[in-house]
Image (spheres, grey):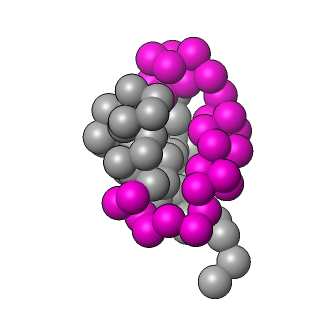
């Protein structure tokens, strides 16, 4: 049985994020580390306002980044 290797969820946006904004997702995760004390939507708003990232891409980055942080 073959396993579908295509990313799902927020990670499915990563190739288009890297292409559109010219930086690897690791760069955006480092940016989010700098505003880690903010709530989810505050982080989304920060990426949109300060870096010109679209809402869907910003939300995907924040959701993935927050999901991999220890509780």
Query: In the rendering, at what x and y percent does residue 60 appear?
Result: 42, 48
Q: Residue at x 45, y 17 (%)?
A: 20
Vertical placement of 23 versus 30: above or below? above
How many numbered circles does the render carry?
0
**Side of 71 relative to 53 (left or right):** right
Please check the rendered image and state whether residue 64 is part of the magenta-colored stretch, yes or no.
no
Residue at 60% over, 50% down: 32
Please tell me in which quadrant of the rendered image residue 49 appears.
top left
Asked whether, in this view, residue 38 is left or right of residue 35, the answer is left
Q: Nearer the viewer, residue 62 or 41?
A: 41
Q: Specify the quadrant that holds the N terminus.
A: bottom right
Q: Which residues are magenta?
A: 16-42
Residue 38 sits inside the magenta stretch: yes
Q: Which image quarter holds the C terminus?
A: bottom right
Residue 21 place in picture, x, y as percent: 50, 19
Where residue 10 appears, as percent x and y from the top left, is 44, 50
* Vertical order, 62 against 58 (above or below): below
Instruction: State the residue at coordinates (57%, 43%).
Output: 5
Q: Nearer the viewer, residue 44 or 56?
A: 44
Report x, y in % for residue 18.
Answer: 55, 24
User: Is the stretch drawn in magenta largely helix, strand or loop?
Assistant: helix
């Amino acid at each position: 049985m073959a396993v579908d290797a295509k990313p799902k969820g927020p990670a499915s946006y990563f190739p288009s994020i890297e292409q559109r904004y010219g930086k690897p997702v690791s760069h955006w995760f480092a940016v989010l580390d700098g505003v880690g004390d903010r709530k989810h939507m505050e982080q989304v708003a920060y990426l949109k306002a300060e870096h010109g990232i679209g809402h869907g891409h910003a939300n995907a980055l924040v959701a993935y980044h927050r999901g991999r942080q220890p509780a």
